[in-house]
Amino acid sequence: MAVRHTRLWHDIVGVFLPRCCAACGERLYGHESALCTSCLDDLPRLRDLDDPDNKVEAIFRGRVRLAAAAAFLQFTKDGMVQQVLHRLKYGGDTGVGLELGRLMAKEAMQSRRYADVDLLLAVPLHRKRMRQRGYNQAQVLVDGMLEEWGLAKVDIDLLRVVHTSTQTRRGRMARWGNVKAAFRLADPEVLRGKHVLLVDDVVTTGATLEGCALALADVPGIRISVLACACA
């Protein structure tokens, strides 16, 4: 009964302050969060988290040792995924980031390769970019994932110690040079023997995630996996 009353209240509030879908702009109803039911159904899900030959896995093969690597959605230029991630990253729409994180967690929890993950770690932003943006879009995804996944939220400092310029429009080698040695783990001992899942919004060349993985790689007994919201 309480749930029914809550949804009714959301619908009434929506008459005066309508909420809109982050993808199509249509009005959201009380049972919908940041994306309407139609757009949720139309999300281009890759559904290949358990495929060791998926396209994200291929990006990292021979570059860094990972237990698993995958992406939740397919990113296409001017497509739905680009639009919603742009809203998350530049438009301050953390609600859609939380929604995407919850969806990512639901899929990862059903995957045999991700089933024994111990903790989630967002790819960090340099403090200068954090001041400019006010939040880390990867951490928003992690926060949404933790709403679904029964994992404890941990405060681990994987520091972005170099303020790298934007990765947009850079080639693979340029991106690698841009992030090499850009990350440092403040307290390696807390990750000893853990299966750590690195989370980011979009993977393209994989250079940023590779830099993070290399910063973690010397921790004794660590297993590192990667999950991006989307793969371009």
Image (cartoon, grey):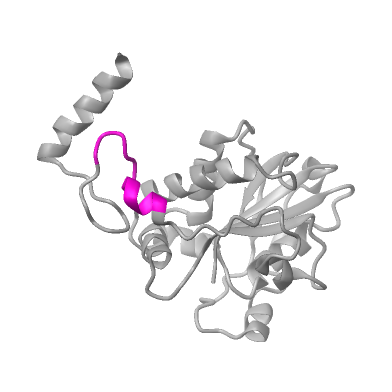
Which sits in the foreground, 111 or 147? 111
| Residue, far top | 1
Asked whether, in this view, residue 2 is left or right of residue 131, the answer is left
Asked whether, in this view, residue 163 is left or right of residue 132, the answer is right
Locate residue 172, reporting x and y percent: 65, 83
Asked whether, in this view, residue 162 is left or right of residue 26, the answer is right
Please give the range of residues in magenta: 29-41
**Looking at the figure, which quarter contains the C terminus?**
bottom right
What residue is shown at x 72% (from left), y 42% (from top)? 117
What residue is shown at x 31% (from left), y 47% (from top)? 36
What residue is shown at x 54% (from left), y 42% (from top)? 145
State which quadrant residue 180 falls in: bottom right
| Residue 31 drawn above or below residue 6 | below
Which sits in the foreground, 195 or 27? 27
Question: Is residue 124 visible to the viewer in this orientation of the structure?
Answer: no
Locate residue 111, reporting x and y percent: 68, 45
Which sits in the foreground, 71 or 185? 71
